[in-house]
Image (cartoon, rainbow, N blue to C red):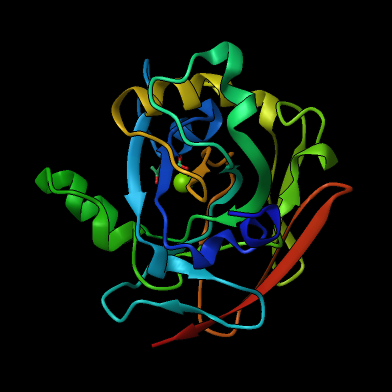
Amino acid sequence: MTTRNLTRFWEWGRKIICVGRNYADHAKELKNAIPTEPVLFLKTSSAYLREGSPIIVPAYSNNLHHEVEFGVVIGKAGTAIPQESAMDHVAGYVLCLDMTARDIQDECKSKGLPWTLAKAFNTSCPVSEFIPKDKIPDPGNINLWLKVNDQMRQNGNTSQMIFSIPYLINYISDFISLEEGDLILTGTPKGVSRVQEHDEIEAGIEGIISMSFKVERS
Ligand SMILES: CC(=O)CC(=O)C(=O)O
Ligand SMILES: [Mg+2]
């Protein structure tokens, strides 16, 4: 695999591993307990979406939420990766949206069911261009923001994450081996809210990248 191919990692069809409740202010806004270990769930590779195509509100949801997240792209496979060498397994980064059918997620939570239809539907993982690792020397201190129709809704810093990127790579790879082209979504800061048909979502990593997506109904 060449680095050039990895810049289109979304075409590889590898795992998308998501971390939930990794920002205390977001856990609080949804009235969730602050986790003592990472909360993990998965998206499928059919969830990927690139700029130029719209986010589709699933027909079964009336409450689609945006969650802006920092994504870590794995460049070197590993199992039980120590925290000390975790960053050697990172090829680069990407800005992501973890689109969430909040009404379905709430229903699943109350019934004790998995979140798959709330989190892993087609178009639920819009991503930016691939950002090579050297463009972000300190991924533990970057600003993420998100606007809907030009109104700021989310504005957070990765320094607010409960579990750091090396901690997450170590934790995840103890149970799920990481492969080149896998993506880790590291959780969202506070400010999640509903989007509807015709809305425009714009999101960015301050000073590095931005992206925008229209919302449509199926
Ligand atoms: C409650 C959630 O949807 C968890 C999540 O995805 C997060 O980023 O936090
Ligand atoms: Mg999320």
Q: Residue furthest front?
A: 1
**Residue 75 makes an appearance in the image:** yes
- Is 187 left or right of 150, judged from the image as shown? left
Can you tell me which quadrant of the image ligand 1 is in?
A: top left
Identify the image quadrant of residue 62: bottom left
Q: Residue furthest bottom?
A: 218
Identify the image quadrant of residue 74: top right
| Residue 191, position as x, y percentages in the image | 59, 47
Residue at 62% in and 64% down: 8
| Residue 76, position as x, y percentages in the image | 55, 37
**Residue 164 makes an appearance in the image:** no
| Residue 181, position as x, y percentages in the image | 52, 51
Quadrant in which the C terminus is drawn? bottom left
Q: Report the front residue among 2 and 133.
A: 2
Identify whether 133 is placed above or below 24: below
Identify the image quadrant of residue 70: top right
- How many labels, in total? 0
Quadrant in which the N terminus is drawn? bottom right
Identify whether 202 is placed above or below 31: below
Identify whether 60 is placed above or below 128: below
Identify whether 199 is placed above or below 42: below
